[in-house]
Image (spheres, rainbow, N blue to C red):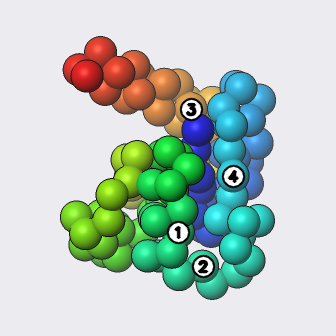
Amino acid sequence: MICTDEHVPSVFVTTLRSNEYDVVRAADAFGEGTDDRQLLEYCGEQDRLLITHDKKDFSRIGEEIAHAGIVIYTDPVFLRRDPETAVRTLDRILAYYRKAR
């Protein structure tokens, strides 16, 4: 289960869903201007991995709040330009961490 922050491109969200990921968008759940702390708490309660571009805020509060994981991407153009490759990359990341558990 995944939650995407406000600025995650819609084409990437659509591609996640077409690859059978259960995705909730922060804007749909909370409206625009979601409080980062509230969003991460929600992700922890719902056992949802958070995908965000907001490294500055989430790397800080990620240490303070119990959560299911945070994926911070650095190239928003990549998610728009090649969402299928981005989803396959996420698949590999998740498979690696599932094995490591």
Residue 45: where, in percent of width, then height? 50, 55
Cα separation, mark 4 vs mark 1, equals 11 Å
Relative to 14, residue 73 above or below: below
Cα separation, mark 3 vs mark 2, equals 24 Å
Mark 2 vs 4, N-terminal side: 4
Question: Is residue 96 shown to the viewer in this render?
Answer: no
Q: Is residue 69 left or right of residue 76?
A: left
- List the residue tagged with mark 1: 39
Q: Residues within 10 Å of mark 1 (few under 14, many from 20)?
A: some
Mark 2 vs 1, N-terminal side: 2
For the point 60% across and 79% down, which residue is it? 34
Check disc 2 and give the amino acid type: Thr
Do labels 2 and 1 touch, CB within 8 Å? yes
Q: Which mark is residue 87?
A: 3
Quadrant hosting residue 26: bottom right
For the point 72% across and 66% down, which residue is it? 29
Q: For the residues carrying marks 3 and 4, which lies nearer the camera in this image?
A: 4
* Quadrant including the N terminus: top right
Check disc 3 and give the amino acid type: Val
Relative to 56, residue 51 above or below: above
- List the residue tagged with mark 4: 24
Q: For the residues carrying marks 3 and 2, which lies nearer the camera in this image?
A: 2
Residue 36: where, in percent of width, then height? 47, 76
- List the residue tagged with mark 2: 34
Cα separation, mark 2 vs mark 1, equals 7 Å
The kind of secondary structure element at disc 2 is loop
Cα separation, mark 3 vs mark 1, equals 22 Å
